[in-house]
Amino acid sequence: TLTQAEKAAVVAIWGKIAAQVDALGTESLERLFSSFPQTKTYFPHFDLSQGSAQLHDHGSKVLGAIGEAVKNIDNITGALATLSELHAYILRVDPVNFKLLSHCILCSVAAHFPSDFTPEVHAAWDKFLSKITSVLTEKMFTVHPQTKTYFPHFDLRPDSGHIRCHGMKVVAALGEAVRQIDNISEALSALSNLHAYNLLVDPVNFKARASQGRGESPRGA
Ligand code: HEM
């Protein structure tokens, strides 16, 4: 969590950023797409050429959301709840991308306000953007916190090595089931024994996992 001094530093420089939300938002996205072109894959429906109207519009939305987080600095989770659901369930943005965007936002702020961007302000903004990232990427274990009890030995912070590694295993098993779609019981029999006899996972938890799909998103999309 941010200290009072860090919150004050974030709020103070936001006073300046707020007057240039459009320019800074657009620049942050331009930096994102040129330094990390793989992030463009989330925007196949956008015109991403420099200065495009969509880039501009989306940049101001992103920075607008950050402004909401500044206004609600003591309740960022509440302020960004809808956005968190959108990014987790509908857009399915891989958490690594939040680090990349945060970096580009920091660079843009530093470039526009060099004298305000002291090491203290830098550190405070870093922490603030990390907090926003956790809020926007923490949904699975947040919506069904009881599921955490099966993972007492895991680091369950968003984007932890444990979560990424386990997520890949789950998806790989789904892939196996797809490949053997006419023989799913056989394909997953070892996993079935593991979950039933060793892990003793209550079947209700399988529903919670499966309903994270696009079709049953909380927004009903
Ligand atoms: C949509 C904020 C990170 C991909 C949005 C919207 C906002 C937003 C406000 C518009 C929501 C709406 O129209 O209801 C943020 C913030 C971020 C962040 C504050 C982190 C600081 C990311 C990252 C990616 C991403 C890292 C992927 C690289 C998208 C996409 C949309 C979207 C694809 C939908 C665009 C559209 O079709 O209109 N985001 N976002 N976001 N975001 Fe993010």
Image: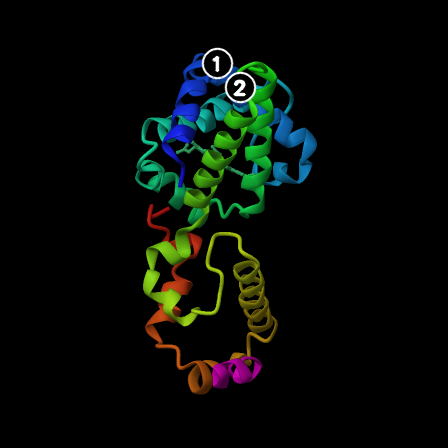
Q: Amino acid at mark 1?
A: Gln
Determine contact: label 2, label 1, CB under 8 Å.
yes
The Cα atoms of the two marked residues, 2 and 1, are separated by: 6 Å
Q: Nearer the viewer, residue 116 or 197?
A: 116
Q: Residue at x 51, y 83 (%)?
A: 185
The dominant secondary structure in magenta is helix
Q: Is residue 103 above or below residue 56?
A: below
Quadrant location of the N terminus in the rendered image: top left
At x 54%, y 62%, the residue is 162
- The answer to which quarter of the image holds residue 196 is bottom left
Query: Element under label 2?
Result: helix
User: In the image, what residue occupies the spot 46% across and 25% down?
Assistant: 63
Q: Is residue 9 above or below residue 149?
A: above
Residue segment shown in magenta:
185-194
Q: Which residue is mark 2?
A: 24
Kindly identify which numbered label has been placed on residue 20: 1
- Foreground of the two, 163 or 123: 123
Q: Is residue 221 left or right of residue 130?
A: left
Residue 88 higher or lower than 45, as above or below: below
Between 109 and 175, the one nearer to me in the picture: 109
Q: How many marks?
A: 2
Q: Can residue 47 be seen at all in this image of the molecule? A: no
The residue carrying pointer 1 sits among few (fewer than 14), some (14 to 19) or many (20 or more) residues within 10 Å by Cα, namely some
Colour style of the rendered protein structure: rainbow
Q: Position of residue 124 (x, y in %)?
A: 48, 31
